[in-house]
Image (cartoon, rainbow, N blue to C red):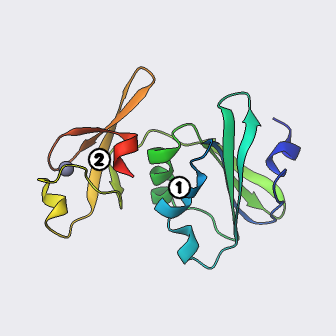
Amino acid sequence: MPTTKIYRVFKIANGTVIDHVPGGQAVRLITLLRLLNSDSIVTMGANMPSKKLGRKDIIKIENRELTPDEINQVYLIAPEASINIIRNGEISKKFPVEIPGLLTTVAHCPNPKCITNHEIIKTKFTPKRAGKKIFFQCHYCEKEFDQRDLV
Ligand SMILES: [Zn+2]
């Protein structure tokens, strides 16, 4: 893919670009990753044409490289996303978000009876793929949920 596409919204010299976020989901992802609480400048493009997704969103975070834990969280909303690490104006690393093993997250378990909704514990989910669909199984109550119900 030509790099000019990646820079269509706003060129950053250093930081992280999350590409191939499903159209309309960038705001959810920015909220999930709590990017607005950080000092980084965050820019997003929404509803950009994409061969792979039809339309896609893109998020750019200046001067910050996402941690592996944060990259795992991206999977909750954008399992087909690719992460670009930008250093000195160049793409230093580019890789797809991978299906994580056990995912520790800030997302709530939708099961009201789940212990995570009664005690202060971080939720954990195991992603499971069934064809094109992805489910998340709660580590505590063992119920399975659609991505849409989680965040
Ligand atoms: Zn649960």
Cα–Cα gap, marks 2 and 1 = 17 Å
Residue at the spot x=57%, y=76% of the render? 38
Q: Residue furthest top?
A: 131
Amino acid type, mark 2:
Phe
**In x, y percent, where is residue 44?**
70, 57
- Which secondary structure, mark 1? helix
- Which secondary structure, mark 2? strand
Residue 11, compared with residue 148, is above or below; it is: below
Numbered circle sitting on residue 136: none
Amino acid type, mark 1:
Leu
Q: Is mark 1 within 8 Å of ligand 1?
A: no
Q: Earlier in the sequence, mark 2 or mark 1?
A: 1
**What residue did someone put label 1 on?**
29
Badge 1, how many Cα within 10 Å: few under 14, some, many 20+? many
Residue at the spot x=25%, y=50% of the render? 110
Q: Are marks 2 and 1 in contact (CB under 8 Å)?
A: no
**What residue did someone put label 2 on?**
125
Foreground of the two, 1 or 106: 106
Badge 2, how many Cα within 10 Å: few under 14, some, many 20+? many
Image quarter where the N terminus lies is top right
**In x, y percent, where is residue 126?**
30, 42
Residue at the spot x=56%, y=36% of the render? 80
In the rendered image, which quarter is residue 3 located in? top right
In the rendered image, which quarter is residue 15 located in? bottom right
Foreground of the two, 94 or 52: 52
Foreground of the two, 85 or 135: 135
Residue 32, compared with residue 120, is above or below; it is: above
**In x, y percent, where is residue 102?**
32, 47
Question: Mark 2 or 1, which is nearer the eye?
Answer: 1
